[in-house]
């Protein structure tokens, strides 16, 4: 199976004159195969979200390499970055904040389609198709983010991320803010899409139980470093590191 | 044993729209009750109603909430002030937001004790330190001298539990006390609340959307959906054999760890 993402010796330093620089991500390396679901777990402050933001270029990498489909995008800008976004898209924790409040959900989804060269008619048709794939009826295209529930908005955010058929989806706590029943629905949707399009997921999450059911492989992060990696069952049933053990023991 | 608090057929409305309907339950001393439901089910309003904290638009439109024989929604603000804190304590989801940001933790604990009639500052500080130590803080002096923002979110929440227990209330109302916390910190806060019951015999009403927390803490539970009771009873029996389809759905949607 081919590799979609390879991260090598990734580092991120946040400068802080008063308290000394913060090494948020420290020498992180991992790979993600096409169609694989990889989870990064850890407590808040462990650096998992920073990794997601470095990979998606929302933050500037201090050092290290990020290969997306063989191409180094660690410092990509402009056209090169735009090309990269055709291959990877991101879904955030707070769906309502990730949409422009002045645009309807339909316009929000169509924006990326139009940006990538579709005609208006075709974009509209595609948008309707995406909404129905994500379990929303046509009329949601005309609603504003504040007019729908958190779960519906997250479905629309997933629809938007899928618009340009990326091969990698980066989900940063994408279900953490949702009620458990809604969370279960969204996960089912993600499973369904993954099978249909053979997409790779980088799934950032603090819920270990959820990861066990959803992902193929898991990375445990602690204080900016990867402390353990393996299949979810390996890591959960026989953790090697003390920190992983503590994390698992805390789950109710 | 006499009932400490009882909700009797309570309805709550906001701006004339009914959002809680016909909720009844009661709690004895030292008992822990978990109220679960999804967002918008009315569970937080139920807690707020006990302390007349529904705001200008909210109102208990039917039923009574009795605490030691007093009908809480009928109390005057002055009468409520006497009960609030000393008899009934409360903790919220974001403890950081319930502390004053520009004053040290110690001063704020001091204020609680002063407001309820203990003017001696030194005695108060000693009392606060003692309680912090009892709740497992290694260095109570450091906590007292800190500003809230100097503590982590988990630490703030743990201090909030201590602040709520300072006056040794008979009843603690906890609204999503662990929902903003990491699993490891969540466990500490749960242990702290259980310790509060062990030391002081405090009864707790715990509102949460996390079934795991209820399972770890509560003797009894009540499941709410769209403002109404779906099911209530002993936690162990509901978890084992839920009778309503909604509870079954909630339980099956909850990710479970296979160890």
Image (cartoon, rainbow, N blue to C red):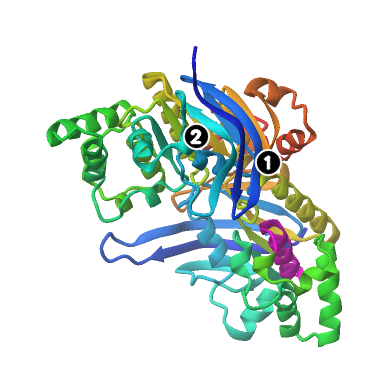
Q: Separation of disc 1 and disc 2 at Cα?
A: 16 Å
> Residue at coordinates 18% horizontally, 30% vertically from top-left?
B126
> Residue at coordinates 73% horizontally, 54% vertically from top-left?
A36
Instruction: Let me know if residue A117 appears in the view.
Output: yes
Vertical order, B65 against B220 (above or below): below
**Residue A212 tag number:** 1
- Asked where in the image residue B130 lies, by quadrant, the reply is top left
**Residue A32 tag number:** none
- Asked if the residue at tag 2 contacts the one at tag 1, i.e. Cβ–Cβ closer than 8 Å, the answer is no
**SS at circle 2:** helix
Name the outermost residue toward the top: B1
Residue A75 location (% of width, % of height): 53, 76
Specify few, some or many for label 2: CA neighbours under 10 Å numbering under 14, 14-19, or 20 or more: few
Specify few, some or many for label 1: CA neighbours under 10 Å numbering under 14, 14-19, or 20 or more: many
**A85 or B46: nearer the viewer:** B46
Question: On what subunit does the disc labeled 1 rest?
Answer: A
Residue B14 location (% of width, % of height): 59, 52
Quarter that holds the N terminus of chain A: bottom right
Residue B147 location (% of width, % of height): 26, 50
Q: Which residue is mark 2?
A: A246
Q: Is residue B258 left or right of residue B47?
A: right
* Residue span colored magenta: A148-167
Residue A159 location (% of width, % of height): 75, 67
Vertical order, A34 against B246 (above or below): below
Residue A159 counted in the magenta span:
yes
- For the residues beneath circles 1 and 2, the answer to whether they share a chain is yes
Q: Earlier in the sequence, mark 1 or mark 2?
A: 1
Vertical order, B222 against B253 (above or below): above
> Residue at coordinates 50% horizontally, 28% vertically from top-left?
B66
Instruction: Let me know if residue B184 appears in the view.
Output: no
């Amino acid at each position: 199976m081919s590799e979609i993402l390879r991260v090598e010796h990734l580092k991120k330093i946040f400068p802080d004159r008063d308290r000394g620089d913060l090494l948020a991500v420290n020498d992180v390396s991992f790979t993600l195969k096409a169609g694989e679901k990889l989870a990064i777990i850890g407590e808040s402050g462990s650096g998992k979200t920073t990794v997601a933001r470095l990979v998606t270029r929302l933050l500037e990498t201090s050092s290290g390499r990020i290969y997306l489909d063989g191409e180094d995008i660690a410092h990509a800008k402009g056209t090169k970055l735009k090309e990269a976004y055709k291959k990877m898209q991101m879904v955030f924790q707070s769906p309502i904040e990730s949409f422009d409040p002045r645009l309807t959900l339909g316009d929000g989804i169509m924006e990326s389609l139009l940006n990538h060269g579709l005609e208006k008619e075709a974009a509209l048709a595609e948008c309707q198709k995406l909404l129905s794939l994500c379990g929303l009826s046509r009329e949601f295209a005309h609603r504003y983010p504040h007019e729908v529930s958190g779960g519906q908005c997250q479905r629309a955010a997933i629809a938007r991320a899928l618009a340009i058929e990326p091969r990698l989806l980066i989900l940063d706590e994408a279900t953490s803010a949702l009620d458990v029943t809604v969370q279960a629905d969204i996960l089912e949707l993600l499973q369904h899409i993954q099978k249909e399009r053979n997409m790779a997921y980088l799934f950032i999450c603090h819920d270990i139980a959820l990861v066990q059911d959803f992902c193929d492989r898991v990375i445990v992060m602690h204080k900016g470093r990867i402390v353990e990696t393996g299949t979810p069952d390996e890591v959960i049933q026989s953790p090697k590191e003390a920190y992983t053990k503590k994390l698992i023991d805390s789950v109710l | 044993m006499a009932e400490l608090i009882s909700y009797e057929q309570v309805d709550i409305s906001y701006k004339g729209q009914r959002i809680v309907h016909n909720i009844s339950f009661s709690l004895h001393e030292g008992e822990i009750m978990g109220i679960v439901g999804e967002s918008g089910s009315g569970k937080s309003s139920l807690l707020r109603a006990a302390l007349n904290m529904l705001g200008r638009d909210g109102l208990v439109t039917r039923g009574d909430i009795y605490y030691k024989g007093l009908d809480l929604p009928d109390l005057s603000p002055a009468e409520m002030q006497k009960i609030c804190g000393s008899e009934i304590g409360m903790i919220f989801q974001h403890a950081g937001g319930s502390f004053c940001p520009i004053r040290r933790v110690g001063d704020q604990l001091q204020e609680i004790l002063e407001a309820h009639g203990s003017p001696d500052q030194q005695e108060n500080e000693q009392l606060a330190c003692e309680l912090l130590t009892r709740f497992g803080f290694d260095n109570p002096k450091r906590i007292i001298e800190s500003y809230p923002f100097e503590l982590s979110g988990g630490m703030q929440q743990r201090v909030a539990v201590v602040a709520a227990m300072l006056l040794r209330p008979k009843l603690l109302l906890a609204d999503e006390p662990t929902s903003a916390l990491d699993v490891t910190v969540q466990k500490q806060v749960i242990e702290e609340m259980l310790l509060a019951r062990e030391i002081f015999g405090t009864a707790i009403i715990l509102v949460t959307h996390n079934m795991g927390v209820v399972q770890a803490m509560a003797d009894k539970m009540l499941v709410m959906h769209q403002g109404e009771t779906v099911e209530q009873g002993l936690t162990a029996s509901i978890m084992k054999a839920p009778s309503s389809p909604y509870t079954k759905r909630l339980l099956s949607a909850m990710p479970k760890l296979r160890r």
